[in-house]
Image (cartoon, rainbow, N blue to C red):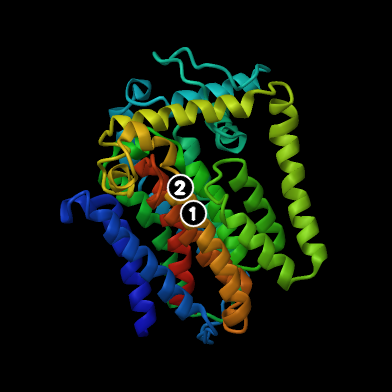
Amino acid sequence: MDNNKLKVTFYFLTLIVLVKWGTDIFLNTANPFALLLATCLFSWYSFVALSNPQTTKVNNTSNLVYPWIHAFVGIFGIFTATEELRKLWIKFSDYARYSDVIPQLKSQCNWFFSGQFPYQEVTEVGHHPFPVYMPFHWFPVQISNLLGIDVRWSSIIMLAIATGLSGFLLSRYYTKVSIKLSIPGMLLFALPLWAFVLEDEHEIALSLEGIVTAWYLVLAVGLATKNHIVITIGLIGAVLSRYSLLFWLPAFALLLWLNVPKRISILMWGSVILSVLVFFVFPFWVKEPNLVHRILDYYYGAADNSWLRPDEYTFKDGLSFNIHFRNWLPGTPIENKGLRTFPQVITELIICGLGVYFYQKKWKNNVDLYTFSLILLFFMIMILYLFSPMLFQYYLLMPLSVSALITWLVIVK
């Protein structure tokens, strides 16, 4: 294994360690800096390793059975955590007592599939939260309803399906790689999940983050295999589950428009826009014109409370610079709360602009736009979260899983 592959693997593992155990190594005020450095180094060495890659032409994996083996190994990696997850489901059986996340998602799903409007106050939780979750985050909860199992298994099932799909598509596309690396490499996808199982177990037991992670993995594998249909499905799923890719979208749209036939861009973005209209705007927003305002109002209200009264789950976990921005921004926390998103927005816009500029001017001939967009996706989501004024640890399952896919690419190519 060459030097760049070792570095990427090392920084992938470092990211997991810093997310889950960083505050045991550093102070919670220092860990965001370490996490930022690891994010930058992982992204850079991945970029270097995947620029003009020399694919190892041994053990041709074009055999029809190999994609299924890769899919099976990926799913098996997720499956190895099921017994520990089952114990967590029992330990946190009364999840509504600890968090309103699952009650909101479960209520939205149940309301919708019983013919009710899914955006209304959840009265089973004491403070009656107004659900802020997008349709493709709560649609898959119906899997658990149909199977009659704990609602949290829907998240794990979605993650397993996305991991299996990733293995299948990666093996079909990269047919000239060593199966001695590519097959065991599929186990990398399970490491982020296992990290959440082993440490701060409530994060995985009190959320359904595997659903969001699954959609973003579909997008990531679409980019990795340059498959426009899979990319489009991934974009739709990502946009309609969590809009963490918000600032990445214009960068990818512009790169696509400048470097591929315009017909592809029109079909892709037309499909995304149509899906947003069909699955969110017409059935929900049109019926409740104040819906987006109510969602944002509830979210920003929660963010205000977190900013003014920092807690261990969104502030003191050492994952975001919010602990510093609260003091660095001018004025007291009450005075500067309106500025709390400025560092995040400005930084993301700068990265978006510089990414497009340098790709078009310097890197276009060294790395294809899909691989570049994949690395940029991971980088921009990590920066979005690192600079977020309110960050829950479980959010990071998704970018860590995307980084597992990138690490697989680096190792096998």
Percent across and percent down for residue 36 are: 34, 60
Q: Which residue is drawn at 68% across and 60% down?
A: 253
Residue picked out by circle 1? 346
Percent across and percent down for residue 121 are: 52, 16
Residue 67 visible (yes or no) = no
Of all residues, the one furthest to the right in this rendering is 263
Label 2, secondary structure: give it.
helix
Q: Nearer the viewer, residue 192 or 362?
A: 362
Left-right relation of 131 to 84: right
Separation (CA) of disc 1 from disc 2: 6 Å
Left-right relation of 49 to 133: left
Classify residue 34 by image quadrant.
bottom left
Percent across and percent down for residue 216 are: 54, 52
Percent across and percent down for residue 120 are: 57, 17
Q: Which mark is residue 342?
A: 2
Q: What type is the residue that disc 1 sits on?
A: Ile
Q: Does the residue at mark 1 contact the one at mark 2 (Cβ under 8 Å)? A: yes
Q: Which residue is drawn at 47% across and 12% down?
A: 123
